Amino acid sequence: MNNEINLTIKPEYVSKYIDGYPLILKETLENTDRLNEEALVMNLLDNKGKFIAKAYYGNQNKGIGWILSLEKDEKIDLDFFILKIKAAIEYREAFYTDTSTNTFRVFNGEGDGIGGLCIDYFNGYYMITWYSLGIYEFQNYIVQALKSCVDYKGIYQKKRFDTKGMYLGEDDDFICGEKSPEPLIVKENGVNFAVYLDDGAMVGVFLDQKDVRKTIRDEYAKGKTVLNTFSYTGAFSVYAVLGGAKKTTSVDLAKRSLAKTKEQFEMNNIDSTKQEIIVDDVFDYFKYAVRKKLLFDMVVLDPPSFARSKKRTFSASKDYVTLLKEAIQITNKNGIIVASTNAANVSMFTFRDFIKKAFSDLKLKYKVEESFSLPKDFKVNPKFQEGNYLKVVFIRKLR
């Protein structure tokens, strides 16, 4: 199906790939001008012609392809993808049998051996996300492999192979089987969510925050006033109310967040009229809260790694300290700030430095209560820590 091409790794990068680094960067290869067709299988050689690894060519914002195998004679065919998907499903066996949860990540890119490919499970339905045209060219193999490994009601897809990782939504996202109801009700830790599998780039809930949401519900929310910023469809707010929060305030700039948050409350028999849902720029809301002398027992910060609105541009690597300082000022003494980022270019070490600087600038003390990275179903390749993109820290404001 796919043509193969031999490419030479520059000498200074050979040991990196032998050691298991999975991402192919353009600057690590010689003669890349020969790459003219995505999904080419690249046999990567050292400068003496010795085989190092087998990869596929697929442009993403982070690189030009991913290692598939360290075995010279391994064929990248249907059997290859069946083996990878079977292993991923076996790794997540406990999720399939968990009666409190029926939505989770089934295949997590390079963590499961194929960078650029993710598969999520939603109560009988599967969603495949393609992160490059290169991996999408293997679609027939991958869909066939998935169908042979699982029982399913229907299979959907999201194409995110614009070079900036943006969603390409010109086609129907439905692939095969039966179409899902709208909304499809899924369950996570006993909490219901309404998701939409064929309604744009996102379905309505980010599965990577499941452990953080559960911790808020089980350990922190009782009796608290909670501000949920960049709230999307209000998942943190739903968990907070179910954990006994006194009141939640959800703030997001997107107009559709209002109806979507109300819907998620209703899915869990919560009266949305007793909660506050605000469509506003989060930084403008912070200014309003300071003016009105509003204080919260818990503030959740879960911004996108990068966002641009009419008023401002937010970059986690540049602006998170400012965001934290705004949040600190409206957090009660002994209150909790849940600081989260999904910026792959910000390490946990750097993120903790952001926290330290924000409190230091305000001459205040804090205590880190606990921290989180990706949950177990989001399997990470230990040789590629950039893939462990989620950093969450529970911070107690002392004084």
Image (spheres, grey):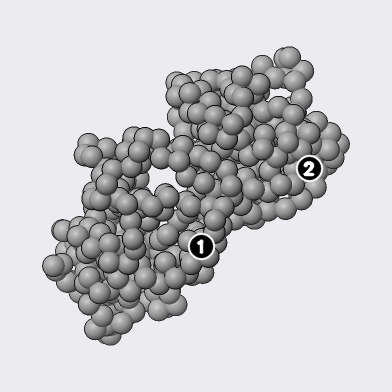
Location of the C terminus (image quadrant) = top right
In this view, the residue farthest toward the right is 399
Say which residue appears at 34% left-offset and 63% top-offset. Answer: 150
The answer to whether one can see residue 324 in this image is no
Is 284 located above or below residue 299 in the figure? above
Q: Nearer the viewer, residue 204 or 6?
A: 204
Q: Residue at x 32, y 67 (%)?
A: 149
For residue 73, say whether it is visible: yes
> Dot 2: what SS?
strand
Structural crowding at the residue carrying mark 2, measured as other residues with C-alpha within 10 Å and reported as few (<14), some (14–19) or many (≥20): many
> Could you tell me residue 115's position as x and y percent?
36, 62
Q: Quadrant of the N terminus?
A: bottom left
Q: Earlier in the sequence, mark 2 or mark 1?
A: 1
In this view, which residue lies farthest toward the top? 292
Q: Residue at x 27, y 62 (%)?
A: 147
Q: Which mark is residue 299?
A: none
Give the residue at mark 2. 396
Image location (x, y in percent) of residue 318: 56, 39
Image depth: mark 2 or mark 1 in front: 1
Please give the count of numbered marks on the rendered protein. 2
Q: Is residue 290 left or right of residue 279?
A: right
Q: Quadrant of residue 173?
A: top left
Up the image or down, 207 lies above or below 137; here it is above
Residue 163, placed above or below residue 47: above
Residue linked to disc 1: 97
Label 2 – label 1 distance at C-alpha: 36 Å
Callout 2 amino acid = Arg
Please state which amino acid type lies under the numbered disc 1.
Thr
Which residue is rendered at x = 23% and y = 63% of the image? Answer: 144
Is 173 placed left or right of 356 in the picture?
left
Q: Are marks 2 and 1 in contact (CB under 8 Å)?
A: no
Given residues 38 and 191, the one toward you in this image is 191
